[in-house]
Amino acid sequence: MERCSRCGFPNNRPGLIFRDGVCGACINYEKRKDIDWDKRKQDLEAILSAYRGKHKYDCLIPVSGGKDSHFLVHQMCSFGMNPLLVTVTDSFTHTQAGSYNLRNLITKYNLNHWQYTISHNLFKRATRAAFEATGEALKFVEYAIYTIPVRIAQQMGIPLVVFGENSAYEYGTSEDDIFSANATIRKMINQCNDERPMWDRYKVTSKEVDSILPMWMLGENDPLVMYMSHFFQWSSVTNLALAKEMGFRDLTGEWDRKGTIENYEQIDSVAYMVHLWLKYPKFGWQRVTDIATRRVRDGTLTYAQGQDLIAKNDSVLDPWALKDFCDTMGYSEKEFFDIVNRHKKEWK
């Protein structure tokens, strides 16, 4: 396994661009210095002006309550938009900080909010299906996080859906610095449809799969789904600072998480950490590598510091997260690791 000479990211992320020893994430990050960010904000204003004030809700923002959600809501309200906030929730234990942050976000700007909760029965069956069939435990709900907001926008006639980062570009699996996410949503819909035999094999019906998909296949602007990271220099550090000014709380004093190097990313749902950790037995790295190499890329950590944090933390699975996952899904810890070890043999 080769590592990026700049940030230390491994070259085995599926689809990762790797050129002359440098990963696509670093290549794309380097392009930031040549971008006219003032022009990008003018472009954003031109897009928003086509929708502003012309509908009861002129945009929809999917939110978790996290730091990036705070940034998105702050920016859209600063541009004079009237968003409807939508959260897709899971059945795992939610942290006190996560629940507080979501309430804070809603009340800070006096916005209306829809919470879409996948039924516990469906969530459990779909999560078990994805975990046992593919090792990607939250495949179903990860689709839903992107597709349910689009479905709601279609149902309510909301013309614009605003997501945060273009993860394919930020993590280096694409060189396309685009603002529209419509093609990505279409790809998700097609992929989910292609997986119907798997869902059916595990008793997740086509009707249940349809329940999380958009009402119809998206056109280019139907509604327009866009990435805010195209218009701003996307940064967890910057977003966190702004979110804290707005009242955001991290996990200090609530949960000393293991297998991570920060206490402010993905903090809403306890067992979600298991989904992130499952990349480790598959690829030999997990979320710690994602975060540490980002911090190296933005100059917050040195290369050596990043690699040291990865070596100490990347293999660790938080015990509370594991317990919450097993309790919610109905596994013993032995059953959990039996499934993981079976996949490890397949992944080799």
Image (spheres, rainbow, N blue to C red):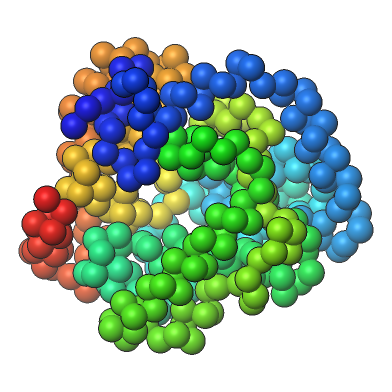
The x, y position of residue 244, in whole percent, is 58, 32
315 or 2: nearer the eye? 2
Q: How many numbered tags mark residues here?
A: 0
Q: Quadrant of residue 218?
A: bottom right
For image coordinates 73% across by 64% down, the residue present is: 222
152 or 115: nearer the eye? 152
The answer to whether 305 appears left or right of 341 in the picture is right
The x, y position of residue 206, in whole percent, is 45, 85
14 vs 55: above or below: above
For image coordinates 59% across by 21% down, the residue present is: 32
301 vs 72: above or below: above
63 vs 29: above or below: below
Q: Quadrant of residue 228?
A: top right
Q: Quadrant of residue 49?
A: top right
Look at the image and tell me in which quarter the N terminus lies: top left
The x, y position of residue 150, in whole percent, is 64, 64
For image coordinates 76% across by 71% down, the residue present is: 156
176 or 64: nearer the eye? 176
**Residue most toward the front?**
20
Residue 261 seen in the current view = no
Residue 299 seen in the current view = yes
The x, y position of residue 252, in whole percent, is 40, 35
For image coordinates 62% across by 51% down, the residue present is: 181
The answer to whether 85 appears left or right of 22 in the picture is right
